[in-house]
Amino acid sequence: MMVANVIWKIVQCLVGFYLVWPSLLSLLWRLRRRTTHLRSTGTPQDTDFAIIVTAYEQTHTLPAVVSSILQSNYSNYHVYVVADKCDITGLDFGSQNVSLLRPAETLGSNTKSHFYAIDRFVRPHTHLTIIDSDNLVHPEYLNELVFVLQQGFQAVQGVREAKNLDTTYACLDAARDIYYHHYDGKLLFESGSSATLAGSGMAFSVPLYKACLQNNPVEGAGFDKVLQAAIVGRDLRIAFAESAIVYDEKTSRSDQLVQQRSRWINTWFKYFSLGFSLVGKGIKNSSLNQLLFGITLLRPPLFIFILLSALCLLINLLVSPLTSLIWLLAFMIFIYGFYSALSKPTTDRRIYKSLKNIPNFMYYQLLSLLKIRKANKISVATKHYHSRSIDKLNEEK
């Protein structure tokens, strides 16, 4: 009985830690934040980008994303569109600055698509940036990346803002992204660690990307998890560029949500153990970068640790009312931290209105949890429904 009691207390401490982790990180950020000064390592145009756009089965969003890239206020780049398992009949972007690549055999992997493009570079680029086929790129995106890269960073994560807020699901998905951008991006980086990677809207020096993934192929989803662990494992920092914006399609349908989250949850269970290695390295190397990042990687998906926390609260209402008050306080701290992340002038009011539907959103994520064993068999890519142009998006905003 004593052993069970000890185990129960340990489980509560582990779950409760991540409930208050955002506030602990905010405190550390306030103690450590400082102004970053630009240390130029060359002229802006010395940064030569390979912009890799990956598509799987669907091509209807490609004209819009390529058009948005071609409107960039930066000229030293070349676009590589890898159309994996796609019908590219009639697909023409009308620019010599774009290479359309159609693999003869299905690749079915992000990293394979990236290296397919790398092997066909028209010139030796210094950096590459990865864009999804459903993204739109802000005209200043490349300039903002250059600003950060010239401070000596070899890896940068930008911001993926919502391209669509057409449904409650899309608004809640956007709220989740704002939360993660704030804590896993801005605060984590400015506290001395690294921003987590988000799958697109990110840039790397070409040698670093090759060193991390060339001999480490990743099947299915999750290449960004392996990549970020490899970068931080070298004790390099992933910078966060909050003004480097790509617009990302948010999940707008329940079936789309379930399939996407199934892959994401499966990816966390597959790769979360990488956090143990980074925590160990952080302690051994006295590296705050590795330690904080490792702690972040070990955190379960948002809805999982919230549900586990709620379960702990309910159990304690029956067995230890005093402890339940501590859990209630922890929940209040988490809610305050969540709203703090969203409380920005740029947050759309539709996002605030959607928060009342969080229980319904979590229900569909529970369905996703039940399907994780078949996650990578469902599809290797999320279906996209929004093909608006960057000009149309700007008009709507």
Image (cartoon, helix red, strand yellow):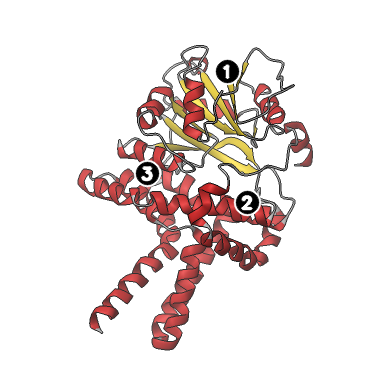
How many labels sit on residues?
Answer: 3
Give the amino acid at mark 3: Ser
Instruction: Label 3, secondary structure: give it.
Output: loop
Question: Which residue appears farthest toward the left when viewing the image?
Answer: 284
Marks 2 and 3 in Cβ contact (< 8 Å): no
Q: Earlier in the sequence, mark 1 or mark 3?
A: 1
Q: Is residue 173 above or below residue 92?
A: below
Image x and y of residue 77, in percent: 56, 18
Residue 185, relative to residue 100: is it above or below?
A: below
Q: Which residue is mark 3?
A: 193
Three-letter amino acid code at disc 2?
A: Ala
* Residue toward you, 353 or 387: 387
Quarter assignment of residue 380: top right
Label 1 element class = strand
Residue at image coords 49%, 43%: 221
Q: Which residue is mark 2?
A: 174
Q: Residues within 10 Å of mark 1 (few under 14, many from 20)?
A: many
